[in-house]
Amino acid sequence: MSNGGGEGGSQQRELHGKRKISRGNDFAFAIARMAVAQICESVEVNSYQDSQTREGLRFSSFQESALESLTDVAVQYIQSIGKTAHLYANLAGRVDGNSLDIVQALEDLGSGLGFAGVSDDNRCLADSGVVKDIIRYTGEAEEMPFIYSLPRFPFSKEKRPAPSLPEVRGEPPDEHIPVWLPAFPDTKLCDQSVETNAGTIVQEIPIKENGTSLRSMQHSFDGARLEILKSLKDARDTAEAEVEGNPFLTVPLRFVEKDVSPFFPPLELSNQVVRINHVPDKHMSNNHYIPVLEASVPLDEINNKNGLADSEDGGKKEGARIQPTLVRFKIGNRKRPTSLAISRSFQEEGWFQEGGDNREKKSEIEDKRGRIDSQIVHSDVK
Amino acid sequence: MNHGQQSGEAKHEDDAALTEFLASLMDYTPTIPDDLVEHFLAKSGFQCPDVRLIRLVAVATQKFVADVASDALQHCKARPAPVVKDKKQQKDKRLVLTMDDLSKALREYGVNVKHPEYFADSPSTGMDPATREE
């Protein structure tokens, strides 16, 4: 006590750290602490020194760090019993442990301190000195339940094993299946799945069709954009045709249609989307119709299309109409920081000068783009 | 052969003793709650539907903690008593479980706990700060 309760520093810190990690265990730890405190309080040593009083000495209070570390040790003790017993159970090829596993684990844990009969290598596990000690302890120590009644954890603890086959069907399964095996997943479901197998096969077809339609869209992008619309319509038509045949397909196909509608938004929004998409790759700054094809389409074609797009720039409605097809591709790109895009848009002028340096060859086109971009920026600002 | 039979009988008796003890645990309520022990056992991977085994673990842990505590108590008692300033202090002879005693007691059980020298522990509960030694 000379250092005035100044002990257990790192212990305390460790404990705190540990509890920060396992925050969900606070309740259990608090209860364990109370239980340990209760046990410690119950420990009594008769003081024979002053024989006239002979009163039992007990701990009446605790240093907090001492109590915490003792609790920690006790919890570790329980857990190492559990681990070792589990190990021995598994070693014997069992999942559930039995009493002998626990006795073995207790012997393992007590081997450091030693117990009666540990030297006898031919002893019976049931006759272990550890168990005898425990039996003696239970005889000596006063029975003292936990002071508080614990709240029940609000869900049923009984683990219901999966019903075995005869329980479900009532009739024994095939000969080669052991009786104790859990039943198969619902057999009715299995039958249904057989029925719906045809459906799933049909389901695959439109997916393929969608894929081809996308591909055809890409090709038609190179040519005229109207073809895309056509192909889209074709795809939808075929999809709808499939829907009539197969009720399972309605959902994904409607999903496609629903995907279209939210992107008919005000033009500014669509422009913004385009801008966000474009900032990272400078040379694509203007062609808000073609971000998807950046990889596949050569620049010259894109530029040509830009010419087309710019010439049709007044008719943005058409672009808006095509937007839905583009939306699907943009989703991946959106993660690029919008803040960056905004800041870039603020630095619009300097940025374009940079771009001009990079692309001196296509200065004419760039000039055009610059103009149109500034228009877009204005519309954004508005 | 005779010896083997005898040992077999003895084993039978031991087995009976163990089962009897386990059966008696149904009536014995350990201080550590069953749910708590079950929780920690489950965390360590051990699963068992039998309450008696959980109580066995609970009793074993209780015994362990009690042993450690009694050892610490012995250490606490064996320590030379602090210099008595007042008579009042001698009257309420309250023992406090300190890290000092605990680490000594735990060392016998193979747990090495060291207490840092300069850690200012929070004042121990239940102790009058006036009587505390600096």
Image: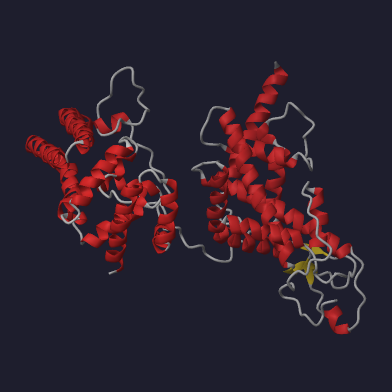
Q: Residue at x 33, y 56 (%)?
A: A370
* Residue at the outermost top position: B1
Q: Nearer the viewer, residue A348 or A128?
A: A348
Counting from the top left corner in percent of width and height, residue A60 is at 74, 70
Residue A273 as seen in the image, left or right of residue B32: left
Image vertical order of residue A66 relative to residue A298, above or below: below
Quadrant hosting residue A72: bottom right
Residue B72 as seen in the image, left or right of residue A67: right
Q: Nearer the viewer, residue A132 or B132?
A: B132
Quadrant hosting residue A124: top right
Q: Is residue B48 visible?
A: yes
Counting from the top left corner in percent of width and height, residue A36 is at 66, 60
Where's the C terminus of chain B, which quadrant?
A: bottom right
Q: Residue at x 73, y 64 (%)?
A: A65
Q: Is residue A139 visible?
A: no
Q: Nearer the viewer, residue B1 or A245?
A: A245
Q: How many marks?
A: 0
Counting from the top left corner in percent of width and height, residue A114 is at 79, 40
Colouring style: secondary structure
Counting from the top left corner in percent of width and height, residue A321 is at 16, 51
Where's the N terminus of chain B, which quadrant?
A: top right
Residue A143 as seen in the image, left or right of residue A162: right
Image vertical order of residue A70 relative to residue A223, above or below: below
Residue B6 as seen in the image, left or right of residue B107: left
Q: Residue at x 57, y 60 (%)?
A: A26
Image vertical order of residue A4 relative to residue A23, above or below: below
